[in-house]
Image (spheres, rainbow, N blue to C red):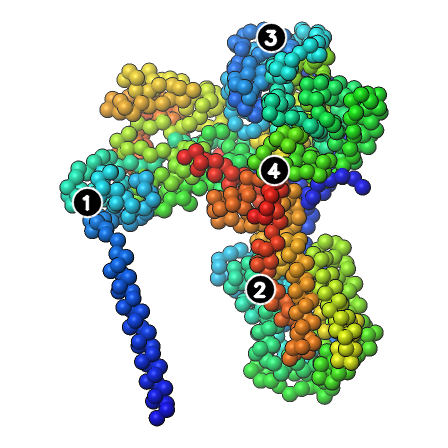
Amino acid sequence: MLLTFTNGVHPQEFKSWTNNSPVERLPFFADYVIPLSQHIGAPSKSLVRKGQYVARGEKIAEPGAYVSVAYHSPVDGVVSAVELAEHPGGKMVPSIKIKADPFSSQRLEKKPIDWKSLTKKEFADHLQNSGMVGLGGAAFPSHVKFAVPDDKKCDYLIINGCECEPFLTADHRVMAEYPLEVMRGIEMLQYFLTPKKTFIGIEANKKDAINILQLEANKHPELAVEIVSLEVKYPQGAEKMLISAILTNEVPSGTIPLDGGYLVSNVGTVAAIAEYFDSGKPLIERVVTVSGSNIKRPANLLVPIGTSMQELLNACGGFKSSDFGDSARILLGGPMMGMAQKSLDVPVVKGTSGVLALGVLEVPGRNTFQCIRCGRCLEACPMFLNPSTLGLLAKKGLYEEMLEENLMDCMECASCSYVCPSGIPLVQSFRVAKAVNRERKVA
Amino acid sequence: MTALAGIATAGLFMGGLGFSLAALLAYANRKLYVEEDPRIDAVEEMLPHSNCGACGEPGCRSFAEVLVNKEAEPGKCTVNTVEMTQSVADYLGVDVGDHDKQVARLACAGGSHVAYFRAKYEGLKSCRAAAVAGGGKGCTWGCLGLADCETSCDFDAIQMNKFGLPVVNENLCVACSDCVDSCPKDLFSLQPVSHQLWVACKSLGFGDEVEADCEVVCTACERCAVDAPEGLIKIRNNLAIIDYEKNELASKVAIERCPTGAIVWLKKGGDSIIKGTGAKKVIRMEPLPRVA
Amino acid sequence: MKKELILSTSPFLHDSATTPWIMFQVIYALIPIIAAAAYFFGMSALLLIAVTVLACLVTERIFTAAKQEEPSSLKDGSAVLTGILLALTLPPGFPLWMAFLGGLAAIGMGKMIWGGLGQNIFNPALLGRAFLQSSFPTAITTWSVPDGQFFSFRGTNLALPFFQGESLDSATSATPLALMKFQQEGTEWFKLLMGNTSGSLGETSAALLLLVGVYLGMRRVFDWRIPVSIILTVTVLSSIFYVINAERFPSPDFMLLSGGLLLGAIFMATDPVTSPYTPKGVWYFGFGIGFLVVLIRLFGGLPEGVMYAVLLMNSVTPLLNKLTRKRVYGHLKNG
């Protein structure tokens, strides 16, 4: 019996296109754009001027506040501009544009860091300066996440290898190809966080990753890592759902998991942390899955952060048909929570786990009908909310009343919209309601 | 005989019941009467009864209370006619106060004939919802054209034109600020009608790059800032900002050399917009082709 | 030339079940039932179904036109479904003009005046039937014998509007439930299972109804818990009464297989609009219907109680939804 949480949905996985393709390194291209707010928190401050030569891995922006991280150049090259540029989130944000040096070898010297001699505070500073953020998609600064205040205690360290979004296989490949880094990262986190127990939660559709990590874990019995296979169900990889699945406990509303002694971290982040301390390489590249029915050659790629989507898609053979068709969408992130893009000029950012080109196959046309109160959304919502009622309230514009229906507990996993037979855009209206409520509170 | 008696009993009983309840009500009305300034009723009668909230009060009655308590001036009501406001002031024996008519103005001129949409938005037909998805317009700051403001306006003062831009009828606009709140891009603001110099753009982009998305964008070329009297216009974050403290200095000089026509001169009455002679003429009268 | 990209919000994947798909699955599932009705009652059955479906579609069209909506609600299949279901609850010899009126009432009073699909409190088909029951109590309790003759009309099918009409066939008989109620006479369970008894169009063949029910439940077209809880409740309660007094009360197998119980449990009670949507509420809803059916059948004045049981439980659906709200994740208490 596999562990899991209550409710949830089973979307088609579409993972077979890329789950056996090893991670390939993307060649270097000419132009890179580094938006200075790829993370959650205050924007970072640029440290470079136009025309300045920067080396690969050199710090080009410093944190703008505590909840903010540093940025590093993904290439040897020259800063061509510091100006507003489009961010995959749809906004224009200050960005550093870098032209790669075509004659550079782009080699990065190994500078291991003696992490065992660091204090907790220094460890967090290192994370902040390495630009480390959660690579699962939210891009929350790691130094904030792993800074456990004195009155709190991390009892359970949970490494999240669920990757419940369809199509995406980036974390899967990281686990299958970098098991040593994952274990090294866990060793470091254990050293600083001293959890009672460490788990790695992996959905059962990644058998190879589970086996490889289990072998690696057997080599490090002192870490006492328990690998848990979980039912394949969306949103298994959501923090709260993962805690419910593994420890059968809920995270009380309005608290963060750490209040209950849980710390959940994405597996890719853990590997990146290990890589940083073992080789000195800051967060300048990440594994990205490029997939979808409209991509000629789906692949898992190691992509320098700042690479434009256009280049990335070209590297995968481009689109199958130049005509996008009526259902074509280009997404950053997974199909359940990702964002559709209006142009291909946006860069890959730290939170980009996948780039998908969808076609009619995945997104057939859909009509909207009236709610027939079938209750499918109630049995899909992992937070046990009532999306049907929330949707009716949203339709009438009763946004404040939605708060009483626990709107703020909604994590926008989109399970309700996924199952709704009437095609009602539930999550979208919830996002609108949240935005309006936020604004009204400010006003 | 018994039938008559029955009717009589019923009549007596119901009559008695009605009478005693009426007496009780009359007594309660006396006993529980709340002393209220009769002027509040009189003032409320002179207010427009639209309960729009433009004055900052929840409704006309509470505004009347505020007026009677002399905590505000009658001119704060932007909906009322000048004559009625004057009569409220006369009745209460106070100054009219500031009655500079304000209207809502849109800081965007990027209709579908001049601004490019880079992607087609599908989903809930509202600007709010489209903003969640990114909108699809090339310009990140521009009007999404799905008419949230038109829907929110209780006075029918906003109509969408054929290019998907809201047009404010200044005669009907009462400056209630509903459109200001409804716009997810914060394009509306309330402006006194005396502010005739107007930057119809909110783009923070610079130069040709933003002009590729919209032909009437402010490219931050600074010509208006140079031409206008000292300090009237400043370029901040690649956008011309007019300092309305110095509004009396404003003249059409500032708009003459604007290459895109992003800064305009609004004629009194709001019926026409004057662009500078340097602005490129927009002669296209149909939406731009929607293919990138 | 490249076409432009499409911008929409997540999720980009959707479950394959759509509202029309659900409606049409039920309609397809009804085809064997309709075939059985045609086998037992011939032309009469098909005519009745055609008339009610037509009435429902016409009413839906009139109302959507009045609301100046696109006629898209015609395409979702719900009106057709209501029409078929209504016909299946009628006796084969029912006058067609009355059936037409029933269709009008079902969609008009049962659905559209509430605001259309998804807004109504009562099951439209059953509301239409209740309307007919109270308007034409005689016609709706006159049952023809299943003779298997295809090309003949039954009962008062062809009566002129506003006339009761003369019965075309001499052979009418009581339904198994009426026999039980008024003559204490049972019917063989095998006969019930096959459906070779008199009754309304869709309630005769228990075996077919069960098969179709299993199919729909397995395809997740409807909530399987509703029919299961109804059947469970009826079985348990009637067993208890049967054990207490086998002379007076019918056996549980008779209770299950006779009358409209299966039709009601599988097609009427499972209407998503009028049944609760909370997992717990669904069970209570089924228990309630089962309890009321047994109560009405054994102690009430009518031989059959499924229609009223479902309608009564429909009326408490909003209450059930409210009472059985699930505790929100991370909250200590309900609400």
Describe the element under mark 2 as helix, strand or loop. Answer: helix
Seen at 54% across and 46% down, the residue is A405
Tell me the residue that label 2 is attached to. Answer: C315
Describe the element under mark 1 as helix, strand or loop. Answer: helix
Three-letter code, disc 2:
Ser
- Earlier residue among tags 4 and 3: 3
Judged by depth in the image, the label closer to the viewer, 2 or 1, is: 2
Judged by depth in the image, the label closer to the viewer, 4 or 3, is: 4
> Callout 3: 10 Å neighbours few (<14), some, many (20+)?
many
Describe the element under mark 3 as helix, strand or loop. Answer: strand
User: Alpha carbon of mark 4 to alpha carbon of mark 2: how far?
Assistant: 35 Å
User: Alpha carbon of mark 2 to alpha carbon of mark 1: how far?
Assistant: 54 Å
Q: Nearer the viewer, residue B253 or B202?
A: B202
Tell me the residue that label 3 is attached to. Answer: A54
User: Alpha carbon of mark 4 to alpha carbon of mark 1: how far?
Assistant: 56 Å
Tell me the residue that label 4 is attached to. Answer: A252
In which quadrant of the rendered view does residue C136 lie? Answer: bottom right
Tell me the residue that label 1 is attached to. Answer: B88
Judged by depth in the image, the label closer to the viewer, 3 or 2, is: 2
Judged by depth in the image, the label closer to the viewer, 4 or 1, is: 4
Quadrant containing the C terminus of chain A is top left
Let me know if residue A191 appears in the view. yes
Please, is residue B87 above or below residue C125 in the view? Answer: above
Q: Are marks 4 and 1 on the same chain?
A: no
Tell me residue A150's x, y (percent). Answer: 60, 22
Q: Are marks 4 and 2 on the same chain?
A: no
Q: Nearer the viewer, residue C122 or C161?
A: C122
Seen at 61% across and 40% down, the residue is C330
Three-letter code, disc 3:
Val
Please, is residue C335 above or below residue C4 in the view? Answer: below
